Image (cartoon, helix red, strand yellow):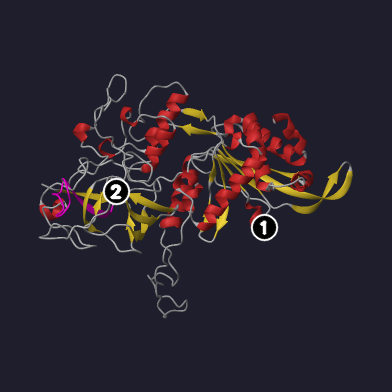
Amino acid sequence: MAQVLEFKLPDLGEGLTEAEIVRWLVEVGDVVAVDQLVVEVETAKAMVEVPCPYGGVVTARFGEEGTELPVGAPLLTVAVGAPAVAGDSGTGMDERSDEGSGNVLVGYGTGAPPARRRRVRPSGGAAAPAGTPSPAGAGASPARSGRSRPEPAGAVPPAAAGTRDARNGVAPSRGDGPVPVISPLVRRLARENGVDLRELEGSGPEGLILRADVEYALRAAATGRLRSAAPAGFGVPAAAPAFDALADQVTSYADIASVVPGAASGASGVSRGTTPAGVRVPLKGVRGAVADKLSRSRREIPDATCWVDADATELMRARRAMNAAGDPKISLLALLARICTAALARFPELNSTVDMDAREIVRLDQVHLGFAAQTERGLVVPVVRDAHARDAEGLSAEFGRLTEAARTGTLTPADLTGGTFTLNNYGVFGVDGSTPIINHPEAAMLGVGRIIPRPWVHEGELAVRQIVQLSLAFDHRVCDGGTAGGFLRHVADCVEQPAVLLRTL
């Protein structure tokens, strides 16, 4: 007998709260295989094609194209273990069609090829019309049918999630059972870093493994601590959205709320007890992500800022000489990034994060450099992976690729998360200086103002030189002012005398 399972919209942006349905890739009555793409959605990060973790017959779709759905809302229902389709040979279903992969993003889990799509004519209530819930008793919510809804793939009941050993804090292995992971970014983070999710105990509801649990395991491994999961309460509570980078600040703005009318009576034109007339913009989507991200940074990080003016005349001259030598061209941002990675190698304290739960500073071995890119959709912060291992030419190519992807809206969630240090070139907006807010959970951000001609004392004489203001916001928990000042001074020295970089090449 077929079992109707409900596939809910996953958190594709690691904390964003909604996504818009762009295009359905299946119809009600279609037969889908495990991990087959079923819908294309747009989040505040990127356009994402979502695969279904179940194999079976699509019985209902929830939401038309253009509809915005909150994370956790039903996307579609699938009847698994359904009888053979009339006219099909064999059973009509893959032997694994009643299994769920637990996966919610392309590239995860099973590699079986998708089955050829087949249409099943709905009959007798076996399938609900598009956009309507399935009938009671066929995967309906408990409130409607009195039955408990089947658990989605990748989730396990509390009894199966395992319990923590009180003596050593290590979760027992789950063997071949399902792993309670919903977020695709958590799966990717674990896979790319060689973390066995079956050995982790989640700190989320009913043992759900969160990103914080994987990051905690990575930090524990880096520092020799062999705990398998973060303690309860580590990182962001399950009920609060978590945002990984300033890259989470990308999407079109939400619709503006209607204007609140004000009364015309009284000298001020507003009656007592009423809200003055004005435009209300909901704090959701981009602005909600910004508000939560920056508020958390200000709340948790005791930041300080130092700054210095530097003569960038020689840096600009060196860039012109590089580009005159041939293609590909080297961008100014790439040179600044190369300077940053050289400075971080000398002052690794600033390429770190703070684990207050364990009261540890975790210094990171790799530099994943975030940078700001202005697009028609807003400000995005893509991340250059392994920036420390790239030369100026390689950095220019990667900056160009990510910037073009940002402008065309094709950045993936992986392109927008995982930064360890941020380079903020706000000079493109025509401003000289800023006190940037640190991109939580990073420990520092370098800001670069505009480069303009100014009077400057050069070799004992007054001259017109190309001057730039550099500012460094840093987490005072990871270092004191001497370290931060040393980092910023090294950056300024490299800007003023690019030959200093030759020492680290």
Q: Dot 1, how many residues are within 10 Å of its Cα: few (below 14), some (14-19), or many (20+)?
A: few
Q: Which element is circle 1 on?
A: loop
Helix, strand or loop at label 2? It is loop
Residue type indicated by callout 2: Cys
Residue 74, magenta (yes or no)? yes
Considering only order in the chain, which callout, 1 or 2, is on the residue closer to the N terminus?
2
Secondary structure of the magenta portion, mostly? loop
Q: Nearer the viewer, residue 496 or 382?
A: 382
Which of 177/89 is in front? 89
Image position, residue 136 (x, y; %): 12, 56
Q: Indicate the position of residue 50 as horizontal and vertical percent values.
A: 35, 50
- Which residue is label 1 attached to? 430
Please state which amino acid type lies under the numbered disc 1. Answer: Gly
For the point 25% across and 29% down, the residue is 176
Whether residue 306 is visible here, answered yes or no, is no
499 vs 13, left or right, is right
User: Which quadrant of the figure has residue 307?
Assistant: top right
- Residue 461 in the figure: left or right of residue 37: right
Tell me the residue at 13%/55% (across/down).
144
Residue at screen point 66% across, 34% down: 342
What residue is shown with label 2?
52
How much space separates mark 2 and mark 1, taking CA atoms?
Answer: 46 Å
Q: Is residue 450 left or right of residue 67?
A: right
Q: Nearer the viewer, residue 100 or 115?
A: 115
Q: Nearer the viewer, residue 129 or 282?
A: 129
- Farthest right residue? 461
- Residue 253 in which image quadrant: bottom left
Q: Which residues, given as a range, are shown in magenta?
A: 73-90
Residue 248 appears at what percent x and percent y?
Answer: 46, 50
